[in-house]
Image: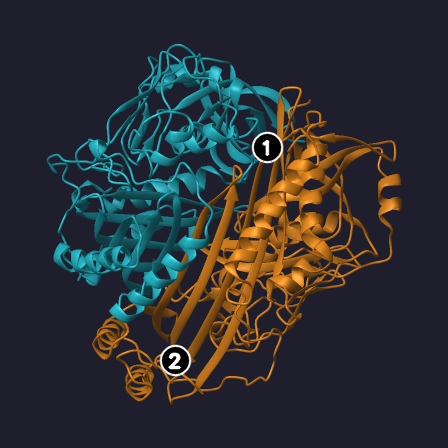
Chain colours: A orange, B cyan
Amino acid sequence: MTSLLKNSELSLEKADKIVSETLNSCDDGELYVEDTKSETIVLDDNKIKSSNYTSDLGYGFRAVTGDTVAYSHSNEISEKSLKNSSDNLKSTLKNNSGTYNSEIKKTNQKLYKDIDPIESKSMKSKIELLNNMNEYARSKDSSVKQVTASLLAEKKNIEIIRSGGELLSDNRPLVRINMSVMVEKNGRKETGVYGIGGRQDYDEYLKNDNWKKVCDEAFRIANTNIESKPSPAGEMKVVLGPGWPAILIHEAVGHGLEGDFNRKKTSAFHDLVGKKVASKGVTIIDDGTIDNRRGSLNIDDEGTPTERTVLIEDGILKNFMQDRLNARLMNTKSTGNGRRESYKHVVMPRMRNTIMLGGTNTQEEMIKSVDKGIFAVSFGGGQVDITSGKFVFNCTEAYEIINGKVGAPIKGATLIGDGPSSLKEILMVGNDMMLDPGIGTCGKAGQGVPVGVGQPSLLINNMTVGGTQL
Amino acid sequence: MIKDQDYLKKIADICLSKSKKLGSTDASILVQSSVSENINVRNKKLDGSERSENLGVVLTTYLGKKKSSIASSNLKESNLNELVDRCIETMKITPEDEYNSLPDKDLHFSGLKDLDLYDETHLSNEDKINYIKEAEDEAFSNNKIVNTNGSGFGENKSNFLLANSNGFADGYKTSQFTAYCEVVSKSNGSMERDYEYTSKRFYNDILKPKDLGSIAADHAVKKLNPKKIKSEKISLIFDKRISKNFLSIFASAISSSAIAKGTTFLKDKLNQKVFNTELNINDRGDIKKANGSRYFDSEGIGIINLDLIKNGILQDYLIDTYNGKKINRKSNGRASGTTNLYFENGSKTFNELIKSEKKLLYIKETIGHGTNIINGDYSVGASGIMIENGEFSYPVSEITIAGNLNNIFQNITLADDLEFNYSTNSPTMHVEGMIVGGK
């Protein structure tokens, strides 16, 4: 196996020796080495505004004993630097002593190809694509006043060296194609944003002129919003569309089911395992094993193979998402949710692809059943307060529902709810489960990681809508 | 240890001379070095330590009006050579952009560096642990505090050099000391979290640990057993930690990039009344020891003080070289955004403000990203405390607040309690008549 250390001043043997010597008296830990290349090309205001290429190489050395984590990272890869880090870890843990847990599951899981999405498409053709997207979007209507399009590709190679010399590795490609369109009509301005992506080459996502659909969708959202009226305020029924609106699941329950908050008993869900936390018929999983998805990983950032973890089954809370540290302290096994943004960050339990499975209802019957409410089709960002359980997210495309019919589009409203109680308010689960288009990034404690979500259409009995119309 | 200017200069020279050799007509480079040490404590016990050493270089090369950039943390000469090659190759096939150029030489910073931005104080891990334990001890002396989400202390030192092929080469060290305490309160089945945070360039300027802990505890306890209120139109008072967010929104709405593209609700508002006539907004980069102070921006252009709003009227934009050219304006040194941005004090005291109406809602926290800079729509989740007849009465949560920033800005009244705790600062703020979404 080739090592990321091969061109550095640090040999794998030396690294092994320092790692083993440092971690022998600890419960857990590893040396994580990362080599990331990324490229971002942005077209903005009719011009290629920037082309940036980043090459990042560094290590993060972690030692864990009990519930204390010592971490040291650097991008100077040398024996001297690693020894300094080792001394730093030892000094933090000098009063603790543990027994190293060498056990780690093995896998041959191959969820994506070992490709370099940056090199597999020429710079020339990327620039051409952006120019085409710009021209196509602007040609759709004279009301299109501004277009921003971007291409992001990344190849992240990681290696995990554990005490005893075990070496685990993963090569992770990732691409994303984004489009933002601003429309101006009758003195009003609105934007529409859309994107696609995942762990394959650009060309897989560009087949059949798929980029045109990305532009069409961004324009459609902007054009819908230009006709929107002020959103109502207050409690009402909400129908959520399938796919990306599952960020509601991500915010409302996903974060609250991460192992760290539950071990620390700061999550509103910490004492609810085995209890009913959602309506019957609601099953939610976190799956790291779907081919080529943005949130999928062969192994997590501690080396544990990812899996399909059932979080809530038919309304009952079954499992939390765990990394090795929190699993050990809670007497369970890692679920392969140990992730970090980069070598500069400590591992935490993080979501992968969080999905509510399909049910039996149709979206049509959901809408028909609502006298007054809103139909939310797409969202911008969301956020949650783990401890109180309150979460919000912002509609980027929504409509009013009056007497069982979808009415006029409404302006960007915020929806706010309570995590533990909102899942009990689910009245119908649709038969149209859909995954998101591959654009999600989740933020936690200042770290962003790529994630996926999915859900069918949902009817929620009661949520507070934050509009301006009383 | 952070690298010294000589080391940074050596790296910069390698890249600049190599790019010149390969045919670039211009180039600019940023070389950075930083070391930070953080300690986390939870429930008065050491939870973790983190030490990070970062090196980085960002190079932008120009061929006439063509441009490309690379960034790397691997500063080995062989790697740098490879990256410069790549940057030049990409640059050659990137289309021209008439606005691309290095900044105007005449605007380069060339002054005294006397702002006191570096404190060489170094705290041992023991000292950091003691500081933050003392804060948690104080928080736990409040009997409704049952848990912590973790509290931390961080010390960061950095050094950088910015250079370009027009002869600019300058840099300096900065330091930052940061502490936070995040606690969980519990009572009658209600669980809430809240925090206090302090961050300064000089160790002696941060909050004392006891104050940090007691303020965090006080915030978390005051949130317990909240009620949800009915949807209504009501005037709001924004706590200082939230009111400053309106300044950040204002700043992004007057960035020359948004102005040039027309993607802001403040386009074409120069010399017009944007806030009520009592309001003034300044951006000053020359306040000694302040978090937002700097000598020059990320292009090397000297910082001048800006009176952005005078008597409610918009006086200026935040301008960098590239976007400045698009709107026929010279850079005013804001390529890295604002420096120390603040509202000047209003004329009312805090007490006068909270007694100004019979019923007011005091907002202490907002969540969500519900600000639309393009059309000014604002809608976020919030929690706070109801004020009745000038007295704080009960906590409120799971509500939304919404309005349009064009109106919100016109309806702001400020108290006289401005403090320079962050780089963006506002006094307590009263906003008349916003829509609260609740039951």
The x, y position of residue A63, in whole percent, is: 34, 75
Chain for disc number 1: B
Q: CA distance from mark 1 to mark 2?
A: 45 Å
To the question of a shared chain for discs 1 and 2, the answer is no
**Would you say residue B148 is visible in this rendering?**
no
Q: Measuring 20% from the left and 48% from the top, which residue is drawn there?
A: B175
Quarter occupied by residue A136: top right
Chain for disc number 2: A
Q: Which residue is mark 2?
A: A27
Q: Measuring 47% from the left and 47% from the top, which residue is drawn there?
A: B95
Q: Quadrant of the C terminus of chain A?
A: top right
Tell me if mark 2 has few (under 14), some (14-19) or many (20+) residues whose alpha carbon lies within 10 angstroms of its own.
Answer: many
Q: Which residue is mark 1?
A: B400
The x, y position of residue B48, in whole percent, is: 33, 65
Q: How many marks?
A: 2
Tell me if mark 1 has few (under 14), some (14-19) or many (20+) residues whose alpha carbon lies within 10 angstroms of its own.
Answer: many
Q: Amino acid at mark 2?
A: Asp
Viewer-side residue, A77 vs A32: A77
The x, y position of residue B386, in whole percent, is: 51, 26
Secondary structure found at label 2:
loop
Q: Is residue B176 left or right of residue A346?
A: left
Is residue A118 shown above or below A298? above
Q: Measuring 13% from the left and 52% from the top, which residue is drawn there?
A: B121
Q: Quadrant of the N terminus of chain A?
A: bottom left
Q: Is residue B143 left or right of residue A42?
A: left
Secondary structure found at label 1:
strand
Is residue A380 shown above or below A38? above
**Would you say residue A84 is visible in this rendering?**
yes
Q: Amino acid at mark 1?
A: Thr
